[in-house]
Image (spheres, grey):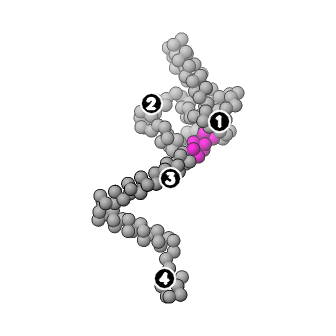
Amino acid sequence: MVHSLGTHRLTEKQKRAQAAAKQRKLRALHPARYRAAVKKCHDKNKHKHYAAARTKDAERKLFVLAKYGPRGEVRCSWPGCDVVDPDMLSIDHVLDNGYEWRKQNGIGGRRFYIFLAANAKSLSDYQTLCMNHQFKKRADRCRFNRKHNSDFSMLIPTK
């Protein structure tokens, strides 16, 4: 678009491209100064960054809980359980191999939900359970192992 004075106005995309080029040049010429500027900007706006991250994490958790819940719902997968509160729900490794999996892959907590949202390879490996049934499953497994010195996987409820 041509301005009445004959100068060319930049589109938003062109402005962003120019700003990015300026940032790359500053980063290449003055890396320490660039890091200091980025840290200053982050420190000034960290409350905004953290709030956005918390919102995104909550949305991701709901998505993952629904993905691994019964019939795609945010609810406990244990038969007969009606818990639907996301604060009371979490992801369970169906085969109780969570410790080994985390040790092997180095992923836990927030990063685990990011992994599950991005990788839906085997939906049967995970399920959504309420905390009561997480503890109930663990107690049943411990009781069974003490009694039979055997594998607990045959007692795990299926979806």
Nearer to us in this view, 125 or 106: 106
Q: Is residue 63 magenta?
A: yes
Asked if the residue under mark 2 is in contact with the one under mark 3, i.e. CB atoms within 8 Å, the reply is no
Mark 1 vs mark 4: which is more N-terminal? Answer: 4
- Rendered location of residue 57, percent (x, y): 54, 45
**Separation of residues labelled 1 and 4 (CA atoms):** 55 Å
Which quarter shows the C terminus? top right
**Front: mark 2 or 4:** 4
Point 52% across, 16% down: residue: 145
- Rendered location of residue 105, percent (x, y): 43, 37
Residue bearing mark 3: 48
Amino acid residing under circle 2: Glu
> Height in image: 18 above or below 62?
below
Residue bearing mark 2: 100
Residue bearing mark 4: 8
Point 66% across, 41% down: residue: 72
